[in-house]
Amino acid sequence: EIKGILFDLDGVITDTAEYHYEAWKKLAEDIGISFDRDFNEKLKGVGRMESLDLILEHGGKELSGADKEYYASKKNDHYRTMISNITPNDLLPGILKFMEEIKLAGIKTALASSSKNAQPVIERLEITHLLDEVVDATKVERGKPDPEIFLKAAEQLNVSAAGCVGIEDAQAGVEAIKSADMFAVGVGQSLKKADWIVQDTTELNLKDLRERF
Ligand code: G6P
Ligand code: MG
């Protein structure tokens, strides 16, 4: 029986994955590193500094700690500008209906996001009341694919991992869910190891999820 549903934020609830992509692409090109969507897949679900490290490695560049701080905060400034205009209209199609359906069924919900900007994003989307717990990058030590964030969300909801479903658009996220021994829903493309893959968020509904769980 499903007791808790744990949502990734960027790319699952709203399309901020696209903003992260644009912000990283601009930064990478500013420092002379080529950047495309294929490489960007490796950054999805990965924390800010870890993402910068992957970009630098990809471009064969090394920077001092101070320079890395500078570039990471520059990327974040650009990202913050992009999210400042988010409204409830930016919820991905079907997500609001799905979250309301979950609430009505008495299933608990939590956010499990690697972003330090999760709080302002969910406030602007006006979905704070639909989430029982919020676990973001400020509350965990290890990033996805480590299972810590999903395990912590389950613990805060007071449900066992076996009763949890995690929903992700990133390979690192699906791996984190599977390492936590939970049922993984993958949104979009070819996510390896997901237990159920949906093409987009309009396919998410409790009946189909329960049949597969
Ligand atoms: C999420 C996104 C990543 C992003 C990370 C850190 O996991 O999928 O693309 O790098 O959060 O976000 P932040 O807002 O803290 O820079
Ligand atoms: Mg994501």
Image (tube, rainbow, N blue to C red):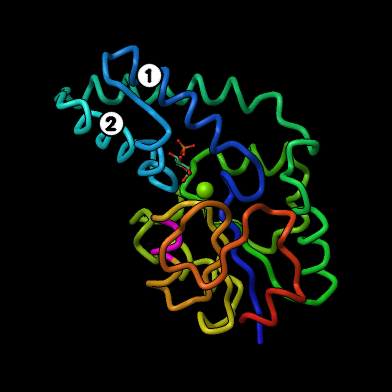
Residue 195 sits above or below residue 170 on the image: below
Position of residue 80 measured from the top left corner of the image (x, y, whole percent)? 56, 25
Q: CA distance from mark 1 to mark 2?
A: 10 Å
1 relative position to 11: left or right: right
Q: Which residue is mark 1?
A: 27
Kind of residue at badge 1: Leu
Q: Nearer the viewer, residue 183 or 34?
A: 34
154 relative position to 139: left or right: right
Based on the displayed image, in which of its 4 quarters is residue 38 positioned? top left
Q: Nearer the viewer, residue 157 or 75?
A: 75
Residue at the image position 47 percent from the left and 24 percent from the top: 23
Q: Which mark sits nearer the N-terminus, 1 or 2?
A: 1
- Element at label 1: helix
Residue at the image position 72 percent from the left and 45 percent from the top: 92
Q: Nearer the viewer, residue 110 or 42?
A: 42
Which portion, as a residue range, is magenta?
172-176
